Image (spheres, helix red, strand yellow):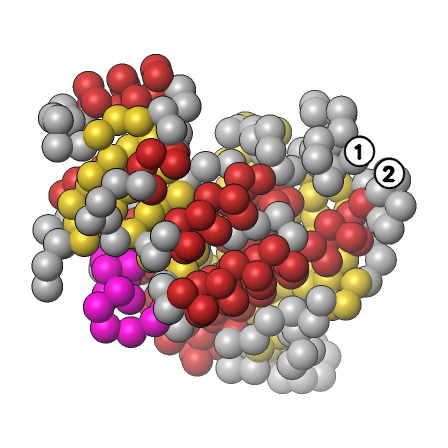
Amino acid sequence: MAQISIVLLGAGRWGTHLLRNFLVHPQIRVRAVADPNPARLKAIAERFNLDGAVALLSDWQAALALEGIAAAAIATPAATHVELITAALKVGLHVLAEKPLTLDSQSAQALCQLAQQQQRQLIVDHTYLFHPAVMAGREAKAQLGALRYGYAARTHLGPVRQDVDALWDLAIHDIAIFNHWLGEQPQQVRSQGLIWQQTQARSQFSQGLADAVWCQLRYPSGFEAQLHLCWANPDKQRRLCLVGDQGTLIFDEMHSTRPLTLQRGSFASQAPPYQPQDLVTVALPVEPREPLRSLCQHFVDCLSQRPSDYSSGQAGADLVRVLEALSQSLYGQDKRPVKGHSWVEV
């Protein structure tokens, strides 16, 4: 397969990670990096020893106008995605976009339709779906027996975003994993949250940006999951659990040597006294592989072989619809205090 010429829009934290992987991929040729911040462009030029073959541009439109490019990777604030993705698709480029795809479901769906009309691939960077522990977990869930519920915690002291709240920044990861493991999407959601820091209105976040959020997801099968999200908590957690009547599957990213474990156990009888039996913890084998590198390979494969089956633009739009419903519960129809916690249909 011939090399894919690509331009990268956005040289921030995540754009830099993408660039690192693009530069070592044998089937990708980076033609340009565009970012309005000269200091960022200088930093990546020095870090990666970029030569004249990679243009460093302050204007994203100039990057999209380069001749011979086939794709664009977009790692810019979510509020800019509609304009940039639309422009890239209209000039005939395949697109890899940072999550979330957009900040509302209507525009997300419109981008999916445009990609289809242009016969171009729109892939969303839901990196956790390419984590080897998440991929192994989908198969391992068969060992849990009848599924009962799930829970996840994603907390840390930063990074604090200024374009979206903690819900839009963090929840998408765990919802994507639950959806992938369960093979279904939530049909009802509710949430509540707290704001401490950014209390001024921001775009559609008219009460400011929530720093801590608690979510509940209800799936068509009856399965329910609870999420705890916070970017103002020094207790760093990256933990997601799936509970069945025969054990619990745990994905804990903080345990680098054994990120996926199965804790087996059940009650000896279904009547008092309830005595635990067969308690054992098993570390499941996980192939050491960088998720983002696997995502980049997936993007390349989608351009030459097949469309994405779980990180497509449509999958991204479906997740935006869930986040939109959670926001409606969180802030309320009238955008008043973040008490929320009313069930909202997805």
Q: Quadrant of residue 110?
A: bottom right
Q: Quadrant of residue 317?
A: bottom right
Q: Position of residue 11 (x, y in %)?
A: 35, 30
Identify the disc placed on residue 338. Answer: none
Q: Secondary structure at mark 1?
A: loop
Q: Position of residue 239 (x, y in %)?
A: 50, 51
Residue 274 belongs to magenta span? no
Which residue is at a point 56% across and 82% down the rendered structure image? Answer: 146
Quarter in which the C terminus is drawn: bottom right
- On screen, residue 230 above or below 246: above
Q: Position of residue 298 (x, y in %)?
A: 28, 61
- Crowd band around label 2 with a 10 angstrom C-alpha radius: few (<14), some (14–19), many (20+): some
Q: Which residue is mark 1?
A: 207
Q: Amino acid at mark 1?
A: Gln
Q: Which residue is mark 2?
A: 337
Which residue is at a point 73% across and 40% down the rendered structure image? Answer: 204
Q: Amino acid at mark 2?
A: Pro
Which residue is at a point 78% across and 35% down the rendered structure image? Answer: 206
